[in-house]
């Protein structure tokens, strides 16, 4: 599913020492592996995003290990303390090893 | 001889009944959530406190139940929340997510959405940088479960 589209909301500016809020959303069906195909009666194989990582200038700020119990189109809201200007990189990895990522800049004054 | 056979039958019947009673787990502890918690804490007991959970009392749609977890902590280099494990005690698989924080997180607070197969307890366990564990359990009533086909 290379069509998964990540969306991230981060403030453009922050004051030094402020804790900023980061909202992320990615379109992904998050097939749990529990669901049965109605026609064949067989379980649909699991295909989920199993890892999310947020880094700032290469250093990990927050990460999440994801199980099938996370809803489709996973939404994650978390925080970071703004100490210096830099660039975020957000990465999602799914069961097929497919990687989705996006970057955002942050100005700190 | 007749008598002995009857006794035998009763004995076999009796032990089978005991085995069945031991083998059947109660419905409210159907999955491996306790095992997963023990693995996370390394067998250490988790204290109550510090952890807050924001969950709906009643979730109409089990496919997407909003959850927020926060843990009280100064989030400095010497004193911060390392990880928070979230499990659901009556989903087909108990694991929901593990959140990994760093001192750069500023606050140990996260929100997401999860699937709940039915009414059950959601449990959050936090690991602090000093090696202590804290936990909180909260029930969510689910009107329509989130694991159907």
Image (spheres, coloured by chain):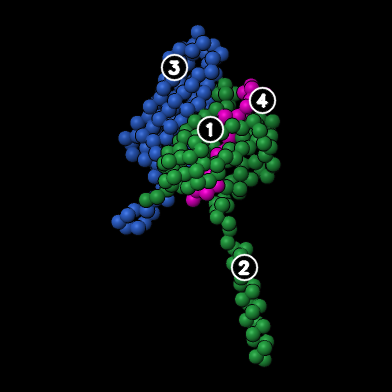
Q: Distance between the Cα atoms at labels 3 and 4?
A: 27 Å
**Going 69% across and 42% down the picture, which residue do you hit?**
B44
Q: CA distance from mark 3 to mark 1?
A: 24 Å
Residue at 53% x, 25% y is: A61
> Depth-wise, is mark 3 or mark 1 nearer the camera?
1
- Name the chain under label 4: B
Query: What shade has chain A been given?
Result: blue
As helix, strand or loop, the secondary structure at mark 1 comes to: strand
Q: Is residue B108 magenta?
A: no
* Residue B88 highlighted magenta (yes or no): yes
Q: Which residue is mark 1?
A: B54
For this orientation, the residue located farthest to the bottom is B1
Cβ atoms at labels 4 and 2 below 8 Å apart:
no
Query: Can you tell which mark lies on residue A11?
Result: 3
**Which sits in the foreground, A94 or B146?**
B146
Give the extent of the magenta segment: B69-92
Which of marks 1 and 2 precedes in the sequence?
Answer: 2
Tell which circle, 4 or 2, labels the residue nearer the N-terminal end: 2
Task: Locate residue A63, reporting x and y percent.
Answer: 51, 31
Q: Give the chain coloured green.
A: B
Q: Residue A24 falls in which quadrant of the image?
A: top left
As measured in the structure, the alpha-carbon distance from the residue carrying label 2 to the one carrying label 1 is: 41 Å
Nearest to the observer: residue A82 or residue B51: B51
- In the rendered image, which residue does mark 2 sit on? B19
Name the residue tied to disc 4: B79
């Amino acid at each position: 599913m290379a069509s998964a589209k990540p969306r991230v909301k981060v403030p453009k500016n922050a004051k030094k020492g402020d804790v900023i809020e980061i909202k992320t959303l990615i379109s992904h069906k998050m097939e749990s592996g529990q669901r049965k195909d109605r026609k064949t009666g067989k379980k649909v194989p699991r295909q989920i995003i199993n890892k999310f990582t947020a880094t700032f200038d290469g250093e990990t700020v927050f990460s999440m290990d994801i199980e099938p119990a996370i809803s489709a189109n996973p939404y994650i809201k978390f925080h970071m303390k703004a100490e210096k200007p830099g660039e975020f990189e957000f990465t999602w990895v799914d069961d097929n090893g497919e990687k989705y990522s996006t970057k955002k800049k942050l100005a700190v004054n | 001889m007749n008598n002995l056979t009857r006794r035998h039958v009763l004995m076999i019947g009796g032990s089978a009944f005991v085995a069945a009673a031991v083998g059947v787990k109660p419905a409210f502890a159907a999955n491996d959530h306790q095992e997963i918690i023990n693995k996370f804490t390394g067998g250490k007991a988790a204290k109550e406190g510090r952890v807050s959970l924001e969950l709906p009392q009643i979730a109409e749609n089990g496919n997407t139940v909003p959850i927020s977890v926060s843990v009280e902590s100064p989030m400095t280099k010497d004193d911060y929340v390392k990880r928070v494990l979230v499990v659901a005690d009556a989903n087909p698989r108990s694991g929901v997510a593990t959140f990994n924080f760093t001192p750069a997180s500023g606050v140990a607070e996260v929100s997401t959405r999860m699937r709940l197969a039915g009414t059950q307890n959601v449990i959050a366990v936090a690991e602090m940088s000093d090696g202590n564990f804290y936990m909180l359990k909260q029930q969510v009533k689910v009107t329509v479960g989130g694991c159907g086909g």
